Image (spheres, helix red, strand yellow):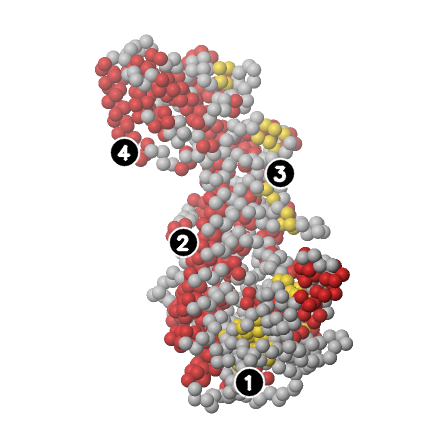
Amino acid sequence: MTTVVKLRGVNRTNTKKSWPYDQYYTGERDAKYRKNGYGENNWSGAKGLFCNNIRFGPGVQSDAKMNNDVGLWRGSQLVRLAWSPVSPSVIPDFMATPLGRNFVEAMRTLLTASERQIGETNSAIDLLKKYGADPKMAVDKWNKLYPKNCTDHNSPLCPVEFFEFNYYNKIYKILETNTHLNSKNIQDIFENLETPETERYYAWNNSNEMINMFTHSFQNEYQRDSDEVDIYSILSGARHHFRRPGVDEINSRTLLLTSYLGYTSNVAELVNSNKACANVMDSQGNSPLMYATSGDQVNVIRFLVEAGANVDNFNDSCCTALGVALIRYMCAYKDISNNILLQTFLPPPEVPIPPPQAVEWNINRELTSQNITGSLHKNSSKTKNISSRKIKSLMSLKDKSPKKVDAPTKLLEETDSFDSVSEEMDIYDKALKEYTIIVNNLLIGPAPTNLAAYAFQVNDMIRDIENMEDEQKKNTDKLPKKTISKAKDTAKPSKDNICTSKDIIDCVSMSSAERIRLDMLNKIKQTIFELLINGADPRLVRCPHSALFMAILSNSPDIITALVEHGADVNEVYRQSMNYSPLDIAISREFTHENFNVVKVLLECGADADRRVPYSDNSDLNGVIGVGPTLLHAVVARNLETDIEEEVRYQLVDLLLDNNCNPAAQFLGRSAIDFAMSKSIDILEVFIKSSKTNLNCIINDQNQNILVKMFCLQYFKSINGSQRLYTLTNLLLYGADPLLPCKSGDEAYANIFVFATKTKNDPTKAIALSDDKEDYKQAIDLVKECARLLHIRWIQGGLVKELVATINKFKHRHWNLILNEWKKKKCIGLWVTPHRCLEIWKILGTTKNQIYKDMTVLKHLLCIVTFLAWRYFDPDKRDLNLGSKVTAVVKGLIEKDVRHMLNQYFGNSKYAMQDLCWKRSYVQPETMEAKNKFNVCFECALPLEDDYILCGVCKLVSFCSLDCMRVNIDRVSCHPCSDDLSKRYFPESKPLVVDILKP
């Protein structure tokens, strides 16, 4: 084989030299498209870059009719054309404007030049030394070891390195691809480079094949004959510098057009019979798959993928086919026209324009700009010059500027029919005309009159929280009030009744325009699903933003679910969007039912609800991102205007709590619960009623819990009486424990009653108005009554557990015999009733103890409790004195009552304890073992001192003083030993009438 190589270098002359090297060459080809160095030059052949015996890179093929097939080649197939349709692009071209190029640069693959020394070790000398040759002789005679004309490049006898050593002047330049470009900031990469003078280039395209061709072309640039191969015109889309297209190029163009039009049979024939490449690109990098995606041609997409098309190929704007489909869906959903598409999807320009990060190599992107009706961005001449300097093309020094050629009045291959009557030309001509008509009618419209808002603008949730803090500091005495009608009369819609998809529209009231829009959305959605089914990777979608981001803005739960199922990271962090995650983005948007469904599906797909929003303190000069608020903080702090938004807020809070967002986590010294107390009582009720909220946790940096803050005077006076009592009742009902130790600031208190008593009696915090005093006392009495109820339930639970343990020990006996083993008969008779016993059994059945699953134990328990209850409370059974025994008649009556009770219990839902408030461990004192907590006065709930008074009858409760005992024994149905205590301590006093404030 003969290869023509033009040597270039210092002190060298151009000469022809025979060398067994198979990269750039001008040679002959045989009919089978194989290189033939010994054949006759019976046709013009191909001119371009070759690798491993096949075409690989830019080149021009000429045929007998003097037509040129121009583009990038891989073997016998064109993989990229120097052509794209003149009509407005159906695929968004973000490289068409300087602002778009500046935006896309951060996503483009970066290539850096590095150096490799050749000839550092000489394998021939090492071989001679290995077999005993003298080192000096090996240096002088090593070149005789190899023949001069070896053509077997894989042979160790072929002196390829010797050729490179001399031809490249001891330096061999290669390219290294930066594979971390998508996951790191491009600016950080440049700052970390050891050599600032390192040459950096943008790859022609992010697709792997284009990167490999770029690397191969760059490495072999010194061998290129610029007179034979004009790589600059091929890559820049200057198709008018060449002759008319040949059959291969026409087939490739037709494949692109028919893919958009949906002519599946033509596409199949072009790929199968005419050998057109299924991955061929136009001059903007758009493949047939992208054209089919833009036309929603699902069948064409399926065929192209089966034919070998890469579903994840990029175009020059760094978009994949899936990214194009998501852009189209978002435009259709938000009614974004083509004239404002770039304005909507590109961020505002940076001022000043950042310096260039790299340069283009042998390509001019300005030639790819499309002229469409209406200017998307107005650029001054100064701005244009800056952009031109930024993306200037780096051409080889040996290339001369191309000769000036008068531009034709019309592009013949675009606007006129071909004179040839060949079938390929005829199909192409018809497809081009149809494509042009459809695209012009679809895309060309009036110029935009107003600037469009940036679609990916993110609401700063930190600012909402800071605004709420500032507003409360200015109005400390005007805390938000709760509207009673909202709390009691407004029925919130069920989550199940909320619309689950934007596509569910009332077809009766739908206009024709809405029907067309809905049909378009469904078609695009099917296209997206088809791409995902055929292997599209949503993680590669980066331009103009990530796949999940665009799906969130489109309010499409179905697409979000499909993207996550096919690999999208639901917890990805978007550095360009304030370091928010997809869930953060959804929460920051407007509160609507559609957006609620988006948040719900993100959580179902595994989004981290307990994630903290990134926060950078303005006082930190380094801008270090620290731990910020929770999503609950952001939802509560948002200022809303409509009732619908408020309803969605309640649902979002409940949803985040259900998905383990921590309500006690603090930001700026306050938890989300504390925010809710200051914002609205309605929001606080959502926290109270959630099973994931610990109502006894610390809620701020003052070490307060909810009850302590409720009794702080400043907050206490900000709520009216009915709201206060309603909230306190719910707090105690759903788990706030008033008997637990608490703190306010650095001071610790035994329980809430100690804190409230000190606050009420503190002269520095005295309650001035008499109404406030009465309200404060009323609130304390309410909490005391609830604390007393907890105390009673704890006593009852302890008695039942002891009795069950005794029954389980002797359960092989009859219950009347087990009764003799129980020593606290009077306590059971006084405190426990059969129906209360069933309630306690149900609660204890939720524990892991298997005793409470034994029906025999339950029957014995009910029989014993019923007998003891008859003994002490039933007036008809007064004949049963303390020492009486269980007769056969009494035993039969009791067992009959127990059977009836059990049948009623298991058959009637009212005994099944279905009330949600009793299903939580922290409101089930029956399961508690904390005796110290209940070491309080049975009346005032203050901790007992050394001189407390123990009830001498049941010996289960105590009083701190005789005054408390007197008040307590006069309460109706409060203490079962009241009569005995009254006779013992107050024999001559009359019963007091005390109003009981029940929750």
Q: Label 2 vs label 3: CA separation? A: 38 Å
What residue is disc 4 on?
907
Residue displayed at 74% across by 65% down: 140
Q: Find numbered disc 2 in the image and state the secondary structure of the residue it sits on.
A: loop
| Mark carried by residue 41 | 1
N-terminal of the pair, mark 2 or mark 3, is 2
Q: Which residue is mark 3?
A: 701
Q: Which residue is mark 2?
A: 498
Say few, some or many: other residues with alpha carbon within 10 Å of mark 2 (under 14 / 14 to 19 / 20 or more).
few
Q: Quadrant of residue 297?
A: bottom left
Q: Is residue 429 found left or right of 812 in the rendered image?
A: right
> What whole-number distance in Å separates the C-alpha atoms at marks 2 and 4?
34 Å
Give the residue type at disc 1: Asn
Residue 883 image point, x, y percent: 32, 9
Q: Residues within 10 Å of mark 3 (few under 14, many from 20)?
A: some
Q: State the separation of the CA atoms marked 2 and 1.
A: 76 Å
Quarter of the image where the N terminus is located: bottom right
Q: Reading the chain from its start, which is encountered first: label 4 or label 1?
A: 1
The amino acid at mark 3 is Asp
**Residues marked 4 and 3 touching at CB (< 8 Å):** no
Between circles 2 and 1, the one closer to the viewer is 1
